[in-house]
C-alpha cells in the first residue's frame, strides 16, 4: 500500500489553515485562503500535491457535506417566499451567459451558419458559462452569517434551478452530436425527479416525531448522513441531477426539525476539520494552466470578462425585476459568478462528444480559477457596502 496520501492530507490541512488565517487577517473570507492553497500546492505553482482518486473522492464528500449543511441552514419560509424570484434570476442568468459565450467564441474563431460544427461549438462555450458553482458562495455567506437571509436563500434557490436548466441545455446541445441522448428523455427525468423529491419529503415529514425522539443521539446524525449520501447517489445515478443538489434537498427536508441543530453541529465538525479543506484545495490542485499561450491568452481574458459580467448582468437584472434593490441585485449577481468544478465537468462532457478541443481547455480553466477566487472577495465587499436593512436576516 502507498502511504503518500497521508503526507498529501497533512500538507493540505496545514496549508489551507495557515492561508485561511492569513486571509482573515487581511479581511477576506477564509475560503479564499483554502482556494489559494490548492493553486499553490498544485501543478500551476509548486506541484507538491498531485490529483489522486482518493483526494477527488474525498473532495466530493466535502462538497456534498457543504451543501447538506446549507440545506439544514436554509430558512424554508424565506425560500418559499423567494421561489419565483429564484426561478427568474436563474433563467435570465442562464440566457445572458449563453449568448455571451456564443458571441465571444464567434468573435475569436469565426462563425459560419452553414457549418453546424462551428455553430454547436460556439453555443457550447456559452453552455460552459451558464454553469454556477454555489459551494464557494455558500461558505462565504455562512462565514458572514447571511446564509439564512433573503440574499442567501435567493442565491441558493437560483443556483439549484440554474443547475436544472443547465442540465437540460447541456443535454440538448450534446444530443445534437450524440444521437444516443434524447432531450425529451432528460426533461421527463427532471420532472419525475421533482415528483420523487416531493413524495420523499412527505414521507420524511410523516416520520418527524420518530426522528425528533432521538434528538442529541448519535444514531440520528449517522442516519441523517446516510440519508444525505443515498439521496445524492440517487440524484446523480438515476436522474442525471448533480449529487450536491440531492444533498441540498436532503438538508432542506430536515431543516424544520428540532434535531437540525444537533445534526448541523456534529457534521459541521468533520466538514470543517477534514472534508471541507480538501474540497476547496482540490479545486486548485486539479488545475493546470499548461497550454495557455499565444492568442488563447487574449481569448482567456475576454472569456473571463464575459463570464463575470454576464452572470452579474443576467442574475442582477433578474433580481432587479423581482423587486430587489440595486445593491441587493448586485450581490445576487456576484454570488452566482463562481463557476468552480461545475464548469469543468460541463467542459469535459463537451470534450467527450467533440464540442471542445484541447486548446480551449486552458482558457476555460483560467476562467474557472479566477471566477472561483474572486467571487468570495467581491461578495464580501458588496454585502459589506449594502444597507443592513436590505439584507436583514429573517427573524
Image (spheres, grey):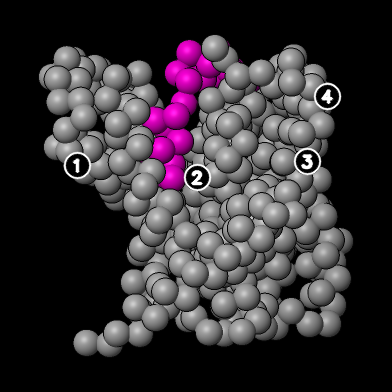
Evaluate whether residue 247 shows in this view. no
Q: Residue furthest bottom?
A: 2
Dot 3 falls on a residue whose secondary structure is: helix
Between the C-alphas of marks 4 and 1, the distance is 43 Å
Q: Label 1 neighbourhood size at 10 Å, few (<14), some (14-19), many (20+)?
A: some
Picture quadrant where residue 176 is located? bottom right
Image coordinates for residue 246, horizontal then vertical, percent: 36, 39
Callout in the foreground (4, 1): 1
Q: Which tag, 4 or 1, sits closer to the chain's start?
A: 1
Which mark, residue 161?
Answer: none
Callout in the foreground (3, 2): 3
Residue matched to label 3: 381
Q: Nearer the viewer, residue 165 or 151?
A: 151
Q: Quadrant of the N terminus?
A: bottom left
Dot 1 falls on a residue whose secondary structure is: helix
Q: Mark 4 touching mark 2, by CB under 8 A?
A: no
Picture quadrant where residue 208 is located? top left
Which range of residues does the magenta coloring cover?
A: 65-85
Q: Nearer the viewer, residue 303 or 79?
A: 79
Callout in the foreground (1, 2): 1
At x 14%, y 20%, the residue is 213
Residue 46 vertical placement versus 392 (above, below): below
Residue matched to label 2: 167
Q: Quadrant of the C terminus?
A: top right
Residue matched to label 1: 222
Image coordinates for residue 181, horizontal then vertical, percent: 41, 53
Q: Mark 1 touching mark 2, by CB under 8 A?
A: no
Q: Which tag, 1 or 3, sits closer to the chain's start?
A: 1
Residue matched to label 4: 326
Between the C-alphas of marks 3 and 4, the distance is 15 Å
Image coordinates for residue 153, horizontal then vertical, percent: 56, 26
Dot 4 falls on a residue whose secondary structure is: helix
Amino acid at each position: 500500500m502507498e502511504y503518500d496520501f497521508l503526507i498529501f492530507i497533512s500538507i493540505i490541512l496545514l496549508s489551507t489553515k495557515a492561508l485561511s488565517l492569513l486571509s482573515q487577517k487581511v479581511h477576506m473570507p477564509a475560503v479564499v485562503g483554502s482556494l489559494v492553497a490548492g493553486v499553490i500546492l498544485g501543478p500551476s505553482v509548486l506541484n507538491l500535491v498531485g490529483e489522486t482518486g482518493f483526494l477527488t473522492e474525498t473532495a466530493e464528500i466535502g462538497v456534498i457535506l457543504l451543501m447538506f449543511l446549507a440545506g439544514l441552514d436554509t430558512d424554508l419560509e424565506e425560500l418559499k417566499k423567494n421561489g419565483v424570484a429564484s426561478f427568474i434570476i436563474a433563467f435570465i442568468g442562464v440566457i445572458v451567459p449563453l449568448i455571451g459565450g456564443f458571441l465571444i467564441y464567434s468573435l475569436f474563431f469565426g462563425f459560419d451558419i452553414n457549418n453546424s460544427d462551428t455553430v454547436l461549438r460556439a453555443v457550447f462555450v456559452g453552455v460552459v458559462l451558464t454553469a454556477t458553482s454555489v459551494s464557494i458562495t455558500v461558505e462565504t455567506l455562512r462565514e458572514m452569517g447571511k446564509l439564512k437571509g433573503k440574499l442567501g436563500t435567493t442565491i441558493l434557490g437560483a443556483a439549484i434551478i440554474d443547475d436544472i436548466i443547465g442540465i437540460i441545455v447541456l443535454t440538448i446541445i450534446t444530443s445534437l452530436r450524440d444521437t444516443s441522448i434524447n432531450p425529451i428523455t432528460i426533461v421527463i427525468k427532471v420532472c419525475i425527479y421533482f415528483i420523487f423529491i416531493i413524495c420523499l419529503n412527505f414521507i420524511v415529514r410523516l416520520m418527524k416525531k420518530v426522528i425528533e425522539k432521538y434528538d442529541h443521539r448519535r444514531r440520528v446524525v449517522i442516519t441523517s448522513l446516510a440519508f444525505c449520501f443515498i439521496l445524492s447517489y440517487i440524484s446523480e445515478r438515476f436522474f442525471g441531477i448533480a449529487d450536491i443538489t440531492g444533498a441540498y434537498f436532503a438538508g432542506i427536508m430536515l431543516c424544520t426539525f428540532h434535531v437540525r441543530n444537533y445534526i448541523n453541529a456534529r457534521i459541521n465538525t468533520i466538514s470543517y476539520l477534514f472534508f471541507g479543506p480538501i474540497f476547496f484545495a482540490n479545486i486548485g490542485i486539479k488545475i493546470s494552466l499548461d497550454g495557455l499561450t499565444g492568442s488563447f491568452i487574449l481569448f482567456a481574458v475576454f472569456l473571463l470578462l464575459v463570464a463575470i459580467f454576464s452572470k452579474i448582468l443576467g442574475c442582477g437584472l433578474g433580481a432587479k425585476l423581482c423587486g430587489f434593490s440595486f445593491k441587493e441585485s448586485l450581490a445576487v449577481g456576484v454570488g452566482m459568478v463562481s463557476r468552480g468544478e461545475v464548469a469543468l465537468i460541463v467542459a469535459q462532457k463537451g470534450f467527450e462528444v467533440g464540442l471542445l478541443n484541447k486548446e480551449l481547455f486552458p482558457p476555460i480553466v483560467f476562467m474557472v480559477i479566477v471566477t472561483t477566487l474572486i467571487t468570495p472577495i467581491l461578495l464580501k465587499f458588496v454585502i459589506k457596502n449594502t444597507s443592513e436593512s436590505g439584507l436583514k436576516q429573517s427573524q
